[in-house]
Image (cartoon, rainbow, N blue to C red):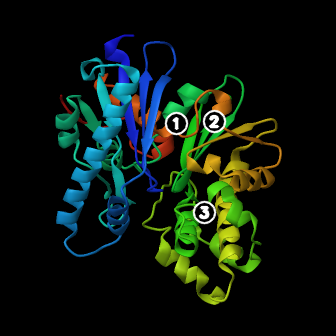
Amino acid sequence: MSASELYIGLMSGTSLDGIDGVLADFSGSHCVVTHHASAPFAPELRAELMALNTSGTDELHRAALAGNALSRAYAQIVQTLLKRSGQPASSIRAIGAHGQTVRHRPQEFDGTGYTLQLGNPALLAERTGITVVADFRSRDVAAGGQGAPLVPAFHQGVFGRAGETVLVLNIGGISNLSVLGADGSVLGFDCGPGNALMDYWCQRHTGQAFDAGGAWAASGKVLPELLASLLDEPFLHKPPPKSTGRDLFNPAWLAHHLQPFEKANPVDVQATLTEYTASACSISANSYKNNGEIMAVCGGGALNAHLMARLQAACPGVQVTATDTLGLPALQVEAAAFAWLARQALHGRPGNLASVTGAAGARVLGAVYPA
């Protein structure tokens, strides 16, 4: 394999469930993931990253140390990938490291806004001896864009089909949809909550980090009045380009909607939150579907059988399946996208799509930290 075409992609998403890393080979006509590694966050790091999503004391100090800890965890994933693949660090052209989003407020406050991903790319470069590309979103925001989602261009290259519209739905902490048009056009935007609210409620009431397979939600019943209240959220009905995060869909937002339902059975709330995620995604998907389409789902949500069933019910006429059936496993897609974005940066090619983010134009994304 050509050393210059081997890249590592690292992703730790809004769901805060841990880190996914891939070793991707771009020497052929398509991205080929040769190795995958993942690891959960240490409980104390996960708790700190979650806390840093909201204002608190001594934030700058805590954020800097959390970024260091995250980069050390990233470095461990890189070492695992190198060991499994038998590749030396010198054979990897670059690492694409997304970092951990703790604030996402594009176009707010001063008209430009900001997006903030914690991490210490310089430390990651020192720990691995590999060039690191990071901070992918801020240039798009500076150009008037949302800074998200950035994956639709990668989705087009991997999942696009000539003459057929393909929907790619990523369900991480937040859900986002890519619309790969039969004519080659690409749209993409955040739909609303993915796993974030379901995971929070599950951990609060069961002690489990997530509702495995959606079994707990499947044992409850949907509360129609609560679902209607959640569906009133203006973001769901806002036209794209649009993006969101825990700045909006967080425990405080949920607590506000739950006030009239204080006596509700927790399992019924979980069922309703799962239905809400499916509904938020289907509102978007049904706006762009055509007969005979496929909706390929990636991210942790693809492993939630109950959620997948509710998505299928909410999107009649569309085949809902995991991206595995199209050649790339659901838990590898986003990490592979950031390997691709790192490659784009080093080749001086744009990583964003103005049709997706609303930026003033195509931009090369990412800051480079040489080995």
For the residue labelled by badge 3, is the local secondary structure a helix, a strand or a loop?
helix
249 left or right of 136?
right
Residue 220 locus on image (x, y percent): 75, 71
Q: Is residue 109 above or below residue 358?
A: below
Which quarter of the image is occupied by the N terminus?
top left
At x 78%, y 42%, the residue is 318
Q: Residue type at mark 3: give it.
A: Leu
Q: Closer to the camera: disc 1 or disc 3?
A: 1
Q: Closer to the camera: disc 3 or disc 2?
A: 2
Residue placed under numbered mark 2 in the picture: 323
Quadrant assignment, res 22? top left
Q: Is residue 256 above or below residue 95?
A: below
For the residue labelled by badge 1, is the local secondary structure a helix, a strand or a loop?
helix
Residue 160 locus on image (x, y percent): 62, 27
Crowd band around label 3 with a 10 angstrom C-alpha radius: few (<14), some (14–19), many (20+): some
**CA distance for labels 3 and 2:** 24 Å
Q: Residue type at mark 1: give it.
A: Val
Q: Residue type at mark 2: give it.
A: Thr
Viewer-nearest residue: 80 or 355: 80
Viewer-nearest residue: 8 or 147: 8
Residue placed under numbered mark 3 in the picture: 236
Q: Which mark is residue 333?
A: 1
